[in-house]
Each structure stands twice: as structure tokens, then as C-alpha cells.
Image (cartoon, grey):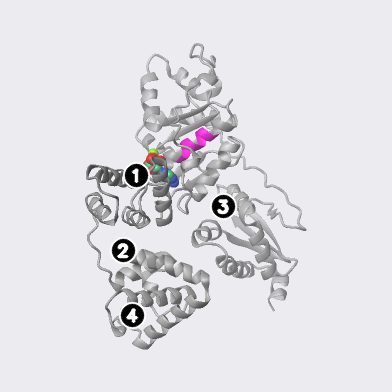
Amino acid sequence: MSNNLYNTSHILNDAEAAWEKCLSIIKDNVNWRTFQTWFDPIKAAALEANVLTLQVPSQFFYEWLEEHYVELLGKTIKRVLGKDGRLEYRILMESGASQRNPISINMPGSTHTRPPKENNYVDMPLKWDDPHNIKTPYAIPGLKRMQIDSQLNANYIFENYVEGDCNRVARSAGIHVAQKPGATSFNPLVVFGGVGWGKTHLVQAIGNEVRRLHPNKAVLYVSAEKFINQFIDHSRNNEINDFIHFYQLIDVLIVDDIHLLIPAVKTQEVFFAIFNHLHQSGKQIILTSDTPPKDLEGMQERLLSRFRWGLNADIQPPDFETRQSILRMKMRHEGLEIPDDVVKYVAYNVQTNVRELEGAIIALFAQSTLNKKEIDIDLAKRVMKNFVKTAARELTIENIQKMVCEYFHVGYDKLLAKTRKREVVQARQITMYFAKKFTKSSLKHIGEHFGGFDHTTVIHSCQTVVNLMDTDAEYKEHLLEIQQKVQLASL
Ligand code: ADP
Ligand code: MG
């Protein structure tokens, strides 16, 4: 029935319905974060004959989908629309108007055209800082591009930047930029995220990689703070032009912590001029911010709109897996040996950021050396007590519920409601199973904690979990992973 319906109808509702079907297939084939990042923002725009047109937020979005998900999308669309099904994209322009001529996905049998680049250059009246009015391009005597010290820290490289769910997009975009600085659509690349989540390390790694791959390119890393100070220093005696000229020599400019520019209105102006010059000359700009660029209140709108030209990639706080990998890498680096349960314990308890994780390892190592004691779980517990506020945790049904909800990205309220959605039912069964296993609660008591299920439901849930573990290896793996988290929480 569905094929006919989709073949003949042109109305938006059908496009939405078809895309909904696609989404439900895609959801089962990618992880939650990928789904949220790359599929949720897509809107169905039209369905005509067998062609479903999707509206995507940017050129970058389109490129990413095509690079990473073309196969999945191709298969999905054929399942939903039949073997002649095709996809087209429409890119949403900044103004909100969508591009008139949609572009087709590069699937076998469809001609593929790249979307034209958006032409976003707005002619703003530039004042004294107009880069095109500068008469003496090399005002600093004798300075050559190659002599510019990049100010990079050689330890911040990709090899020791652990990849995880928390940084995957930003990291791959970074590698891409390092390979072709200035020649990708990620210009500027804006990396944003909280303190100690790895922004500086990542952008410096990009800089170091550019220097390795393109030794002739002038790379410069500068913190926004230093940039402001340099500007203030140069704002006397007409030295501003020297300052601008210097920055215009750079091929890859990395400015760290641009949120610090907010109160510095004059510096923003000069940065705007430098940005324009570099961008128009095809030079790469890489920025970091502790706030999503769209929320940088107090930053000039014309700067904010430029930040949107490229890619804004977020870094999340390191997840449990990534924290463990980072710890293991640091240990290898320092030649330390720390038992596995201690690594897990530290990774579990130090959750805020990577800098604290490093601090914890150093503290642990120091204590072990000073007291001439092996690093074991007891020592870890003592050291961590001073390090993070870990009240001894009692494992309650609520704790377990929260951990399982977090693992499956299921809302806590859903777990308690009598919904029959598959992922909620699964989370509920697993929680009941662990509640039975790790707390002293009665079956009746456990049932009550889920908004009033009776004890037979609890028994049935536990039985289902045991059966599934026996028959489904992947399920078992997930379950053991959650179990590990639950057990660690009770240490
Ligand atoms: P931010 O700039 O976001 O405040 P940093 O880049 O300075 O954070 O990171 C803090 C510390 O954590 C640095 O020593 C850095 O090397 C380390 N770090 C952060 N993320 C990672 C990662 N993914 N892999 C390895 N080390 C990391
Ligand atoms: Mg930083």
C-alpha cells in the first residue's frame, strides 16, 4: 500500500510520513548521539514521484551526511520508497530561505552535483582597519612568514588525543582541516565546550598537524587574552597597522577562548578585519569558545554571523569510556602501572573534566611513592576522598534507575510511566533485574518504585533479562557494561 501512496502524492504530509519511516529505520542503525546530531535536525521538504527532498541546515551538514551515511540513507530510502526511491537535499541558507535547486544524493543511478557554495560575503563598511587600504604590507622590518613562531605546544598532538563519543565530530573535523587548511567548508572551525574538556589540546593538535603536513604554511596559536593584550600594546603610535599586518601573514590562525573577546569591543573590531582578510584569502581560521557561538552575548553580530559560516563543533564532557582510555594513555605515557579496578574507580569518580583526571593520577602516584605503597583500590579510595567529594554511596533503587536511564538515554519519568515503548520496557526490565540483584528490596517494594507494578511483573522482567542474556550476545555485553557501572557506584 505504501508504494502507491508515496508515488502519487505530493503533499508535505506524505514527505513527513515517509521521512518518519526512514527515521525509525535509521534510529535502529546508528547510536543515539549520531541520531540527535545528524538526523534529528533534518526536515522533510517534499515528496514527488519517488524523490524525497530533505532540508538540511548547512552545506557542511550535507557533506557530512554524504561522507558518512550515504549508504545507510540509500538503503533506507529504498526500503521506504521502493527500489526507485531517491533522495535530494535542500540546504537552508542563513537567512532562512532554502536553496532553490535541490541537490541529489550521490547514489548509484542518480547524477550528483555539488551544491554551489553559499556566497555570504557581506560588504560591511570598514573603518581604519580596512585590510584593503593598508599600504605597507610588511611593516615589521625583516619579518618573513616562515620565521613566525607558531607558539604551539609540541605535546598537544592527535596521537595523544583520545577519541571518544564526547569529541568525535570535532576531532574528525579537526583532522580534515589539518589536511586541507582553508580548503574545506569548515572555515572557520569553531570548537566549543566546557573547561578542561580538551579544546586547547585539539586545536593545537590541528596546528601541529598542519605544520607536519604543510611545513610551508605559517601557523599561529594565540589565546584571546594574549591577542587583546597585544592589541592594547599596539594601539599607540599608529602601531595598529603593524599588528594587523602581522596577523595577515598567517595561513592558519588559531585563537583560543574567543569568549574572552566579549568585553573587548575595540579588539573585536580589529579581529573582524583580520578574520575577513584571512577568510577571503582562503586562509584557515580555528577558534575555541566555552559557549556555543550562537550564545556569545555581547559579541558583535557581524562576527557571530561569520562564526556560522563554517562548522561549530561541540566537545562534551568526557564519558566513562573516554575517561578510562585517557587514564590508560596517561599511564602508558608516564610509565605507570595501575590495576584495572583502580582505573575504573578513578574514571568513575572523577567526572568533571580531563584536567582533574590528570590531577587524580598524579595525586595517586605521589601518595604511592611517598608511602611506599602499591597503588590499589584502598589507596585510590583514600586519595580520591580528598580529591572529589565522594560520599560513600548506598546503592538504592533510585540510583540504579538513574544509571540505567542515563545509559539508555531514557527519561526517568518514562521509566515510571506505563509506556510500552520498546526502549523504555527494556530499560525498566534491566533496572528491575539489578534492583533485585544489588539491593535488599522485596519484589513488591521494587514494583512500587516503578509507579506501581506488581511483583509478578518484576519476576517476569528479571526472567526476561536472564533469558535474553543467554541468547543475545550483544544484549549481554550491554548488560555487563551497565552492571560494571552499578557495581562501581557502590564501591
Ligand atoms: P580546555 O581547553 O577545553 O579547557 P584542555 O585542552 O586544556 O581543555 O585539556 C585539559 C587537559 O586534558 C590537557 O592536559 C589535555 O591534554 C587533556 N585532555 C583533554 N582532552 C583529552 C583527550 N581527549 N585525550 C587526551 N587528553 C586530553
Ligand atoms: Mg583551553
Secondary structure, mark 1, is helix
Q: Distance between the residues labelled 2 and 4?
A: 24 Å
Query: Predominant secondary structure in magenta?
Result: helix
Dot 3, crowdedness within 10 Å: few (<14), some or many (≥20)?
some
Q: x%, y% of residue 158?
A: 50, 40
* Magenta-drawn stretch contains 182: no
Q: Distance between the residues labelled 3 and 4?
A: 40 Å
Q: Please state the horizontal and vertical placement of residue 205, each as a whole percent of the image.
A: 49, 37
Q: Which mark is residue 451?
A: 4
Q: What residue type is labelled 3?
A: Pro
- The three-letter amino acid code for the residue at tag 2 is Ala
The answer to which of marks 1 and 4 sits earlier in the sequence is: 1
SS at circle 2: helix
Q: Nearer the viewer, mark 1 or mark 4?
A: 1
Looking at this view, is 327 or 409 the one in front? Answer: 327
Residue under circle 1?
Answer: 358
Is disc 1 in contact with disc 4, using a CB cutoff of under 8 Å?
A: no
In the image, what residue occupies the spot 57% across and 27% down?
A: 217
Answer with left or right where residue 435 lies relative to residue 300. left
- Residue at (53% x, 18% y) in the render: 134
Closer to us: mark 3 or mark 4? 4
Badge number at residue 489:
2
Q: Is the CB of mark 1 within 8 Å of ligand 1? A: yes
Q: Position of residue 320 (x, y in %)?
A: 40, 56
Which mark sits nearer the N-terminus, 2 or 3? 3
Relative to 198, say whether 351 is above or below.
Answer: below
Q: Estimate how packed mark 4 is, as few (under 14), some (14 to 19) or many (20 or more) residues with alpha carbons within 10 Å.
A: few
Three-letter amino acid code at disc 4?
Gly
